[in-house]
Amino acid sequence: MQLYSTNNPNHIVSLEEAVFKGLPPDNGLYMPTNIPTLPKSFFDTIENLSMQEIAFEVTKTLLKGYISDVDIKKIIDEAITFTAPAVQVHDNIYSLELYHGPTLAFKDFGARFMSKLMAYFLEKQASNINILVATSGDTGGAVASGFYKTNGIKVTILYPSGKVSTLQEKQLTTLGENITALEIDGTFDDCQKLVKTAFLDAELTQKLNLSSANSINIARLIPQSFYYFNTYAQLKKLGKPIVFSIPSGNFGNICAGLMAQKMGLPVHHFVASVNANDTFVQFLKTGEYKPKPSVATLSNAMDVGNPSNFVRIFELFGKTADGVRNAVSGFSYDDDITRKITREIYNKTGYLMDPHGAVGYLGLMDYLKTQKTELTGVFLHTAHPAKFIDTFETDLKSKVEIPFELSKLANKPKVSIKMANNFGDFKTFLLKK
């Protein structure tokens, strides 16, 4: 598998180099030089395959012998140890529950796969690496869990102070060992900018072996494609075209789905459902991409004003707004409607959505209103509702059951290092560390 920089198609690197560098030196993003298509026979019998079997076939096709089948299977078997069921909410509407991994968030797919892939490469290199990751919510916890006590890897997580839920913060600040949490006085966009700037700093890249675990890293997108294929396998028997609605922040999740479609996955349409941070929705309306400062919302993992993976999506469709519009629709929702729909669906069906899933549901329903043909609608439910107990329990007038994976964090002390939104301070910290 070879990859190129979105800022320079002549800059070609191997998968190993792309995974460890995270970002090209020209501040682009790495994209595959070729996205292979899976054979028709794979889709003809996909309903008979497990998640792990699907993941193996997809990875083997993408890597094309770059890693042996034996090693690919080992990586998959160690990383993907949980399911992603498509649960019917009502009528032809399904919730794709992506929170059955160890940190109860969809980020477990990418973080665990990436940690096993990096460990495979590092074992060959006999070297160490420093991972930098910015989080607006669930990425930090998933990366902390996925890389915890992994030999040769140290992880520094940057998160915006006061802008992640209490339980999300506990997930990334209570492990210790090779995991360090930096509590930044700013927004997620500020955290992401600090990480990106570090990768472009000559002194840091010379003295430290840096990599990223954000969705800017191509190793995150490969495993996130698995559950799109697996959802098709689960719902194929219904015989209706599938629409995916993805609650979107940094747009890595929807980018993975679009890559799956390029590999041959039959998808009728994608919906990018966002909160008040509507940069992408405005792009669809105007054809102009204008990043803006992010604002805080209930669906905090989507509080991104300048989605990194936009450039990858733009690249997939020939850098044309019309190309993107043909494949993706977009809708934006504020916190009031997010709260309202959560209450309504819970009261009518007993199904509880987290704020991100609620936004995904809203976008799906609005898109389906514009369609005359009968479709199967799937919204991605990206985090366990219990993570947002502070937000919704009083609204629902019902006690939310907290899973053991979260309840065990309650009495663990938070350990973080507070830091100003200043690259000089961040750089000094990294060099001293």
Image (cartoon, rainbow, N blue to C red):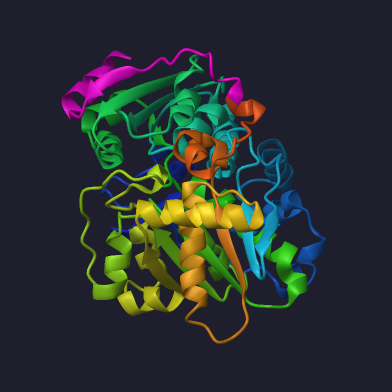
Residue 329 higher or lower than 382, as above or below: below
Q: Is residue 373 magenta?
A: no
Residue drawn 52% across the image and 35% down it = 387
| Farthest residue, direction right | 48
| Farthest residue, direction front | 397
Question: Between 144 and 97, which is closer to the camera in this rendering?
Answer: 97
Question: Between 422 and 389, which is closer to the camera in this rendering?
Answer: 389
Horizontal relation, residue 109 to residue 253: left or right: right
Figure quadrant of residue 322: bottom left
Q: Is residue 171 visible?
A: yes
Question: Between 125 and 159, which is closer to the camera in this rendering?
Answer: 159
Provide residue 430's location: percent of width, then percent of height.
29, 21
Provide residue 136's location: percent of width, then percent of height.
38, 39
Q: Is residue 423 magenta?
A: yes
The region drawn magenta spans: 407-433
Number of numbered discs: 0
Provide residue 259's location: percent of width, then percent of height.
52, 63
User: Which quadrant would the C terminus be assigned to in this image?
Assistant: top left
Question: Between 293 and 411, which is closer to the camera in this rendering?
Answer: 411
Residue drawn 30% across the image and 28% down it = 161
Horizontal relation, residue 332 to residue 234: left or right: left
Residue 3 higher or lower than 196, as above or below: below
Figure quadrant of residue 338: bottom left
Residue drawn 56% across the image and 34% down it = 115
Q: Is residue 2 visible?
A: no
Provide residue 302's location: percent of width, then percent of height.
39, 49
Residue drawn 66% across the image and 65% down it = 90
